[in-house]
Image (cartoon, grey):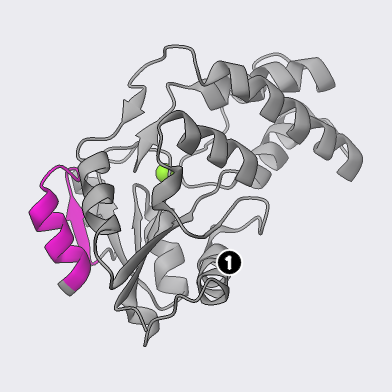
């Protein structure tokens, strides 16, 4: 039995890919559906890739069946592999992320996983680019369920299959940068820590029901303490 399962969001929490995702989505959308700048007004923070695509298709008035969506997904991933290497605004790890994950990896009583709206493949491409794969043992992704609230139970079930279980749902913590991250934790009876390194500032995150709100993850000792005891 482990004392905590820590489920990290990716974008705005662990890292920012410098809009590589936006560029790859936009290019794939134009290529396959003939629509330029298809994602310009689509809200993405905290949303799953599946819902982001549904929203973009609706705004563009495009009907796409499962095969067309799958083709889009494949092309998006192909383009993303190249885009992730290009420079972009705020591209990089968020403050304190690497030392925090290193410290957590040394603690026998906790295991880190992912809960992200990203499809699994772009999630992996991002983590590989920033050398973070080794810190995460399981996860739930945007292709597992369109609604983020359904992802935490999937991640917990996969943790269980990897031999990682905790006593109670409250021993699962979701660490994310949007109100939707907080909400998906609440839906699963888990707790949450909101971090203001993404598209929401401290004041907005304090209006959520997050158990704690942090400016960033840079104070390793304080964050570890919060994660283990909070
Ligand atoms: Mg995020």
Residue drawn at x 45%, y 75% as measured from the top left: 164
Q: Looking at the image, can residue 34 be seen?
A: no
Q: Nearer the viewer, residue 106 or 49?
A: 106
Above or below, comparing residue 202 to residue 79 in the picture: below
Q: Residues within 10 Å of mark 1 (few under 14, many from 20)?
A: some
Q: Nearer the viewer, residue 92 or 214?
A: 92
Residue carrying label 1: 150
Q: Position of residue 162 (x, y in %)?
A: 53, 71
Q: Position of residue 207 (x, y in %)?
A: 25, 57
The quarter holding residue 213 reads: bottom left
Above or below, comparing residue 170 to residue 173 in the picture: below
Q: Quadrant of the C terminus?
A: bottom left
Above or below, comparing residue 146 to residue 230 in the picture: above
Element at label 1: helix
The quarter holding residue 222 reads: bottom left
Q: Does the stretch in magenta take in 220?
A: yes
Q: Position of residue 133 (x, y in %)?
A: 46, 44
Image region (quadrant) for ligand 1: top left
Q: Nearer the viewer, residue 222 or 109?
A: 109
Q: Does the stretch in magenta take in 216?
A: yes
Q: Looking at the image, can residue 193 be seen?
A: yes
Magenta segment: 211-228
Residue drawn at x 81%, y 38% as measured from the top left: 69
Residue drawn at x 74%, y 22% as measured from the top left: 29
Q: Quadrant of the N terminus?
A: bottom left
Q: Is residue 106 left or right of residue 154?
A: left
């Amino acid at each position: 039995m482990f004392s905590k399962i820590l489920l990290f969001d990716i974008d705005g929490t662990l890292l920012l890919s410098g809009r590589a995702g936006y560029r790859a989505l936009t290019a794939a959308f134009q290529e396959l559906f003939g629509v330029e700048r298809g994602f310009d007004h689509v809200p993405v923070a905290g949303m799953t890739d599946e819902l982001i695509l549904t929203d973009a298709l609706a705004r563009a008035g495009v009907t796409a069946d499962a095969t067309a969506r799958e083709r889009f997904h494949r092309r998006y991933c192909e383009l993303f592999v190249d885009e992730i290497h290009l420079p972009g605004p705020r591209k990089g790890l968020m403050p304190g992320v690497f030392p925090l994950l290193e410290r957590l990896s040394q603690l026998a009583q906790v295991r880190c996983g992912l809960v992200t709206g990203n499809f699994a493949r772009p999630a992996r491409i991002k983590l590989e680019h920033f050398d973070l794969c080794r810190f995460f043992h399981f996860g739930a992704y945007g292709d597992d369920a369109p609604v983020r609230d359904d992802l935490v139970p999937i991640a917990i079930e996969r943790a269980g299959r990897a031999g990682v279980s905790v006593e109670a749902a409250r021993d699962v913590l979701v660490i994310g940068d949007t109100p939707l991250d907080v909400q998906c934790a609440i839906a699963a009876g888990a707790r949450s820590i909101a971090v203001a390194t993404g598209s929401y500032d401290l004041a907005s995150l304090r209006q959520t029901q997050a158990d704690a709100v942090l400016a960033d993850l840079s104070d390793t000792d304080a964050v570890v303490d919060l994660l283990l005891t909070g």
